[in-house]
Amino acid sequence: MIKIAIDTGGTFTDYTAVGTFQNGKNKMIFVKNPTDHKNPARGIIAGLKKLAAAWHTDLEPLLAETEQIIHGTTLALNALLEKKGAVTALFTTEGFRDALEIRRSQLENQWDLQAEMPEVLVPRRLRLGITQRMDYKGDIIKELDENAVRFACRKCKEYGVQSIAVCYLFSFLNPEHEKRTAEIIQEELPGVFVSLSSEVAPKIREYERTSTTVLNAYLTPVLADYLNIIKRELAQFGWDKPINMMMNSGGLSDTDAMARFAVKTLLSGPAGGACGNEAMGKMMKNSYTVLADMGGTSFDVHVADIENRLIPQSEIAGYPLAIPTIDITSIGAGGGSIAHVDESGRILVGPDSAGSVPGPACYGFGGTEPTVTDALVVLGLIDEENFLGGSMRLNKKLAEKAIDDKIAKALNVAVKEGANIIYQIAVEMMADAVRLVTVQKGNDPRKYRLIGAGGAFSLFAANMMDALHMNEVLFPVTGPVFCAWGMLGASRRSDFTISFFMERGQWNPQKINTVIKDMKEEGKAELIRLGVPEKQQDFCLTLEMRYIGQHHEISVPWQGTFTRERRDALDIAFNNTHESIYEYAERDKEWEIINIHLACMETEKENILFPFAENKLPLTERIVAGEPFGQAGEISVPVYHAGDFLDDGTKNITGPALINFDYTTVLISAGFVGKTIRNGILTLTKVGH
């Protein structure tokens, strides 16, 4: 049987598959195709047909032999960035409807008084106060005014509201009013989606909880429509099994669950890469790895340090997200990122992207803006005759024209110099992103291995590695489809988080054990619904803790039950975790538990390393710009192929050189050497290391 993973990105969609077809030989196959933004489901079917052709069959027979389809998508994220979500209303406690706009009254840069804040997703006329009130213990001090809810529903009907977020004060301690409100909405507005904060993010912090609930309401109808189309399209080819969806947590759920919680899929694609990063570290017996994934739209960075730690709260496009998420940093520095000259004469790269349509100018689809990909073509680093695995030809003249018109003339430089400036800026932007998750958190990047992923990063890796003084970068053969490869090893999972307040001096093990027992029973039921038998279920407990008076909490893993004697062990675990993250701990200071998080998951699965494909192409030479290789002027470099490494592992390739993989090319600068350390992994180091 076959397992398939699909990762829909902003520019390309990636497909990986492993298994046997009709009792034949075990195969490992991956392909890519451009993302169809107008009809993503149609694009996925086209990609699956391409995958089936690689198995020498049609789609229907392939799906008949497929046991699992895993899907990660940027659809919800794109809907948020492009502000194409559902028409949304917010029902909140009377007097608090402006909390969403007041935010935390904080600026990312306190000196920038002109800073633009992200658009409020619910206009004030649809932020409706409802008479009701709970106190800080969850006790009702003012009953829910059901007439006020019905009046608010009538107002929503006038404005064509498609989705309603409900977020009342302290509902995370007592959801009674929110649940009754949902019942009334269904009576008054059947068909309107309802998002309850007590289900989406039952945690302390009103603004963050409201933001997350509104995001879910805004995005879920869009994702639900897409998932229904995907299921309908696949059903035409005989697929009648569940589709597993990748979540922000690095685990898998299904389309039924995500059709109610789209907010859990905002980082579903990059989360697959984080799973792959952790898997690579285990394969190489090196827990310290940094994933650098440069796709068509963004550059994603993830640090694996023994295991994938979840952060209790993150931020997406300026909106707080109060659900557990793998810690991934993204910047707008992908192959399609647009370069431009600002008013002061500086060249800026990103965050705007040309996407797949019209795409970079060199695609020939009507794009006129210069992109990173155009710069790579002009520098000779991309073979214009063999792009996207040979399925697409690029137009170098269009790339030169775009850079000349928008960059070179503005700076009064030659076209190739303009292209090299774009290249060098992209290198430094990516290096800064890695510094952000290593140096600025007190970690030395030199102790980490860099994992090169995405279709474009391998052309920047040597120079970025040099800028960061890192010792080694690994290029798996599945690097161009790394997130989809990572998804193949993901497990089905469900996460539960509740607010639970306990200071060190108020230690009550019986109380916390009772809460965890109830959470575990709920988790077992959800895993069984997802098809995970009880003997394959695993549970990971995390306490979100902080020093008393500290603003934000950290996640502290814990095993076993709690007793009076184990408080000291928790004391040590919290301080050690704090020190591992921030390089310091205040061991004499009192701490408190804020939230309890229980991850309920299928027992861990292993990723399969894809091998190099056999090469039948001869060694060639290519004329390229020398600057990316650390040399001046135009130079001639040998062009090898990944299949050239199918020997005893002793073959070394010293730069300057290029190595073609399927869907990407590795650049080896002067003073660097590339060699294979396993069949399927190329390593790049400095000569002498």
Image (cartoon, rainbow, N blue to C red):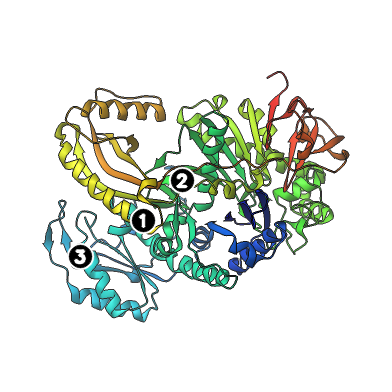
User: Which three-letter amino acid code belongs to the residue tagged 2?
Assistant: Asp
280 vs 13: above or below: above
> Quadrant location of residue 117?
bottom left
Q: Position of residue 168 (x, y in %)?
A: 24, 61
Give me the C-alpha separation between circle 3 and circle 1.
29 Å
Q: Position of residue 469 (x, y in %)?
A: 62, 25
Q: Is residue 337 left or right of residue 580?
A: right
Name the residue tied to disc 2: 112
Give me the C-alpha separation between circle 1 and circle 2.
51 Å
Labels 1 and 2 touching (C-beta < 8 A):
no
Q: Residue at x 34, y 71 (%)?
A: 125
Give me the C-alpha separation between circle 2 and circle 3.
41 Å
Residue nearest the viewer, comparing 123 with 672: 672
Name the residue tied to disc 1: 528
> Quadrant location of residue 220?
bottom left
Q: Position of residue 680 (x, y in %)?
A: 68, 38
User: Which three-letter amino acid code belongs to the residue tagged 3?
Assistant: His
Screen quadrant of the N terminus? bottom right
Question: Crowding at label 3, few (<14), some or many (≥20) Cα neighbours within 10 Å?
Answer: many
User: Which three-letter amino acid code belongs to the residue tagged 1?
Assistant: Ile
Judged from this view, the residue extending furthest toward the front is 23
Q: Residue at x 25, y 35 (%)?
A: 549
Labels 2 and 3 touching (C-beta < 8 A):
no
Name the residue tied to disc 3: 177
SS under mark 3:
helix
Q: Is residue 432 left or right of residue 245?
A: right
236 vs 279: above or below: below
Residue nearest the viewer, comparing 525 with 482: 525
